[in-house]
Amino acid sequence: MKTLFKKDTFWLLLVIVVSVISIYPLFHKGFYSFHDEAHIANLYEMTRGISMGEIPPRWSPDFSYNFGLPFFNFYYLFPFYLGAFFYLIFKISLFWSLKLVFLLSVPFSGMAFYFLMKKYFSKITAFSGAVIYMFTPYRAVDLYVRGAVGELWGFVAMPLVLLGYVNLIEKRNLKNFLLCSIALAFLIITHNLTLVIFSPIIFAAGCFLLISSQKKLSSLVSVFLATLFGLLISAYYWLPAMMEKKYMQPGTPFNPFDHFPFIKQLLFPSWGYGVSTWGPYDGMSFQIGIVNLLLIILVSISLLFFWEKILSVNKKMMITFVLLFFSYLFLMNIRSSFIWKILPLGEYLQFPWRALTVTTFLSSFFVGFIECFPFKKLSKTLPVLLAVLSVILTFQYFKPQKYLEVTDNYYLKRFFADRVSSGKSEKESLEYANWTESYIPLTIWTEKRPESLPGKKIEMEDGIISYKEVSPINLEVEIQAKKESEVIVNNYYFPGWKAFVDGKETEIKILEPLGNMSVPVVAGEHKMSVNFSETFIRSLADKISMFSIMIIFLLPFLQKFKKLKFP
């Protein structure tokens, strides 16, 4: 039995078994209501992009009454890659594909956190930390109230990134270098908001590790190169998003200054399936968690009363993490509004209470510091007791408000004007008329959204046209123009759309107020093609990422056969 306890496999299997308590309601045959149900629409558009051969998918053709938008040029990607994989490969429904993405995020986050904690603490304490990490109340909020799929997988990525930097500074070799870079790239494409809010933790932990390193300069160089390589791997996503953001209307539908939680909301247990509103009467919970608060109290007390008995390196780590925890608490308080005004945090994070992702991470890690206590028996048993207590106190939160016995069409008719699971619907959806798509920004050329489906995708007043939709981003048109005229293409314009008349690229004009496109033609018969392709910056970013991914596969072979050494 003692041999079994020494194996990581045992503890990882135990993490998976315990995680079932939190994800069991997901095995229900239907789905459930949650705030971000539009993720079904996002997943559908990802499958559409992949199916029409757009790699990487950027254009989403069915949003905004089929005028389309470059949604995945800016929105986070990995959860929808994973969902599209389930949908396209296993031929299951959209909502089951999304449920699998939800479901897998919990045990994977627990396993990732276990490996991080095992670097510093015993296996049983690492297991305890993983359980608390999975059973902090905010995890239930993300899973069953918000349905925040990006944050759910952000909980997987955060410990992997930190573990990547820890391993690289501890042992500078090619394997750790590549794993660190891949982990960072994974976080970037998984949830950009988690990256923004978790960056101070990465920076602080990196500084702590570098200061403790015996070879500071070489460690710093390794960290810099790994970070750079992680950015290069994910360049296809973040580089176009940064460079082409100027073509999208700024702002967010949420005012961050309306969403600062009150202190009592952070400290006292509460629960609800409503939304975040101004004031102290929100319909959802912002509690940090009883066990999590107990851990910060225990760690703070140990620093005050057992200072002399704690090892120097543990003191530094404990102080660093405690200060970071309270910094994030302050960031969630209205008194930090001056920081939100100075920095563009509101534009990116939208809700100050998103900092609960990091307080969840930090407070779960605190359970490891119990091993630093001078009481040996307590330090061995207390982490397990706290892990059990976290399950007992929070498992009742891990359930939906109500189940929905639905099919994919229930969602497709709500979020699209004419899409159903079999393809295109003959009738315009009445449910879609009540959907605002407010979470999707418009291009700078679009003054207002259309109010109905266009008569045709391509129209012309003075002439006859026929067209073939090779794919939503590749249209072939035959034109018989009676006189000089304009062909109207009912897609929003965005850089990358090109028109060719009789094989020659033709200037595209942008129409008001919708921001759709027109292509001038002279009298006569013509063949025209309209397609969406990569711009120079997107193409460059794609090549950078592709080249970097090739290096990932080539470097291990080069190191093996050419005996290359990692600097």
Image (cartoon, rainbow, N blue to C red):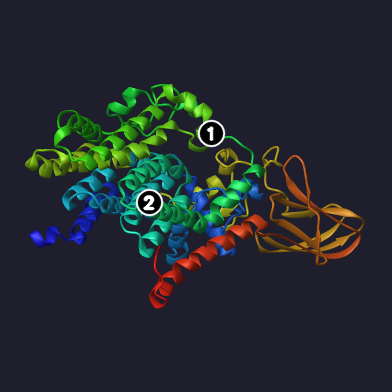
Residue bearing the label numbered 1: 344
**Image quarter hosting the N terminus:** bottom left
Task: Give the left or right position of residue 158, taking residue 366 as reference.
Answer: right
Give coordinates of residue 403: x percent, y percent: 36, 44
Give the label on residue 161, or none.
Answer: 2
Question: Residue 527 appears in which quarter of the rendering?
Answer: bottom right
Q: Is residue 245 visible?
A: yes
Provide residue 563's location: percent of width, then percent of height. Answer: 39, 74
What is the quadrant of the C terminus in the image?
bottom left
Q: Is residue 410 visible?
A: no
In the image, 318 versus 316, the foreground residue is 316
Rendered location of residue 129, percent (x, y): 23, 45
Q: For mark 2, give the secondary structure.
A: helix
Which element is circle 1 on? loop
Q: Which of 215/394 is in front?
A: 215
What residue is rendered at 77% in x and 44% in y? 511
| Marked residue nearer the N-terminal end (1 or 2) | 2
Residue at (37%, 23%) from the top-left corner? 262
Q: Residues within 10 Å of mark 2 (few under 14, many from 20)?
A: many
Q: CA distance from mark 1 to mark 2?
A: 24 Å
> Above or below — where is 468 with respect to 207?
below
Image-based side of 448 in relation to 149, left or right = right
Which amino acid type is marked by label 1?
Answer: Pro
